[in-house]
Image (cartoon, rainbow, N blue to C red):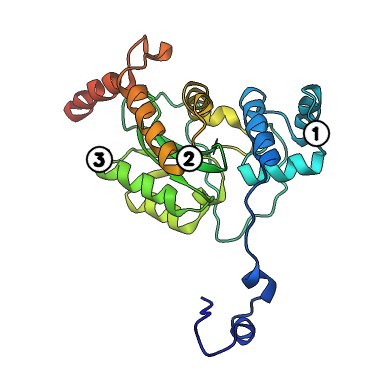
Amino acid sequence: MIDRSDKLPVVQQCALLGLSRSSVYYTPKSASESDLSLMRRIDGLHLNHPFAGSRMLRDLLGQDGLKVGRRHVSTLMKKMGIEALYRRPNTSRKQPQHRIFPYLLRGLEITEANHVWAMDITYVPMRKGFVYLAAVLDWATRRVLSWRLSNSLTTDFCIEAVEEAFQRYGKPEIFNTDQGSQFTSTEFVELIQGHGIRVSMDGKGRWVDNVFVERLWKSVKYEEVYLHAYDTVCQAREGLQRYFKFYNERRPHSSLDGKTPDSVYFESLPIQRAA
């Protein structure tokens, strides 16, 4: 939008576009070593205590000898894209163009592949930074259908993951997400509805509405991410590629009677075609 090579001064370009000069000249700073360490610890605490807000996390960190203020914890939580999960009144003002859809899975029997897909985003720590991971999961079989990494919480990498899942595995009847801005965006909703799929969204703060994705994140982090300090995004991508292959093809699930997601997913597809 701003062309620094243009003859028109940047000041005048900002005035024409209605932008402040500070936003143009600002260069984002990378997180400090101490903040990255805190974010890694907060991530682990959030996995085990998803109901903990900034005050409780501050106190839990204090028990470990980490003295940090509540406001700083809150700032890091926003950067990580996490919040305390608990039932509370919905008092936030939504943008008119971001429609919220009802939760369609309550009381619904989901036993076959491609009946319901779910999607979510999580924070992934690295040695010198962090990235965000988005994944599409088949609800009934727990199979990870596609995933993407991004260094920012934008909509485009979520759309890429969904498009890959559509291309490789067809489409579900229902697509469930939380109420994150990536999933309520016009582009994302139009992509889902454009394929004739019903949109379902978790209730605000209702982690149990998408519990299988929450369990996936815990498995990914404790069985892969926390065991490896990725130096680069490339290393993170390679490690996650290796893990998701193991997760789908070899990792037995107690909820699937010891079977793997791959075996349950592909076994149920002929049944669907026959029906």
Left or right of residue 62, residue 105 in this image:
left
Residue 133: mark: 2
Viewer-nearest of labels 1 and 3? 1
- Sequence-wise, the earlier of marks 2 and 1 is 1
User: Between marks 2 and 1, how big is the CA–CA gap?
Assistant: 26 Å
Viewer-nearest of labels 3 and 2? 2
User: Between marks 1 and 3, how big is the CA–CA gap?
Assistant: 44 Å
Q: Residue at x 73, y 47 (%)?
A: 91
- For residue 102, say whether it is visible: yes
Query: Dot 3 lies on which element?
Result: helix
Q: Residue at x 81, y 39 (%)?
A: 70
Residue 187 position within the rendered picture, expressed as x and y whole percent measured from the top left? 44, 58
Where 132 falls versus 229 (above or below)? Answer: below
Q: Which residue is mark 3?
A: 168
Left or right of residue 90, residue 187 in this image:
left
Residue 77 position within the rendered picture, expressed as x and y whole percent measured from the top left? 68, 41
Query: Dot 2, how many residues are within 10 Å of its Cα: few (below 14), some (14-19), or many (20+)?
Result: many
- Sequence-wise, the earlier of marks 1 and 3 is 1
Q: Which residue is mark 1?
A: 55
- For residue 20, say whether it is visible: no
Q: Residue at x 69, y 31 (%)?
A: 86
- Sequence-wise, the earlier of marks 3 and 2 is 2
Amino acid carrying label 2: it is Leu
Query: Dot 1, how many residues are within 10 Å of its Cα: few (below 14), some (14-19), or many (20+)?
Result: some
| Residue nearest the viewer, comparing 6 with 205 | 6
